[in-house]
Image (cartoon, grey):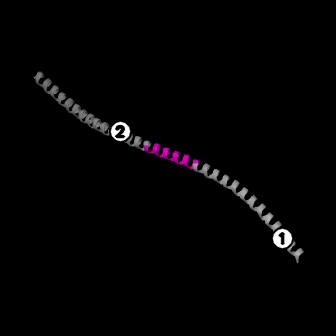
Amino acid sequence: RRAEAENKMRLAQAESQKLGEEYRTYKTEAGTSLDGLTKNVEKLTAENDALRKELEQIREERDEQARKEMALTTRLNDAKKKEAVKSNAAEHYEDQVDLLQKQLAEYKENLESRTSE
């Protein structure tokens, strides 16, 4: 019985020693793995922050472009209105010139007919 008990004790000690070694190995690997994961999280967080900043800058640039486009569109519309007013005025004056030229021709005819009598 004693030999059997000593044998069981040796087996238990060997098993205990084996479990202790496995635990130390696991603890070391888990620590290494945790460090690696922590570094990955930090790296991904930094990349995410950089992308968010870049996205915000792109949005600001897009908004600025939209404001510039709106201002240019307004200026273009104003210029078109002014051009239309000028075109209408030019047409009006051309009509007046035509009318005045007709009247002048009529006056000249009247004058010639009176001076020839």
The residue wearing badge 2 is 75
Mark sitting earlier along the chain (2/1):
1
Tell me the quarter of the picture where residue 115 sits: top left
Q: Which mark is residue 9?
A: 1
Question: Considering only vertical position in the picture, is 114 above or below 46?
Answer: above
| Rendering coords of residue 56 (x, y %) | 49, 46
* Count of numbered marks: 2
Question: Considering only vertical position in the picture, is 74 above or below 24?
Answer: above
Quadrant for the C terminus, please: top left
Residue that extends furthest to the front in the rendered view of this protein: 2
Q: Nearer the viewer, mark 2 or mark 1?
A: 1
Per the rendered image, the range of residues in magenta is: 46-63
Marks 2 and 1, how far apart in space? 97 Å
Front-most of residues 62 and 111: 62
Tell me the quarter of the picture where residue 95 sits: top left
| Kind of residue indicated by mark 2 | Arg
| Rendering coords of residue 114 (x, y %) | 11, 24
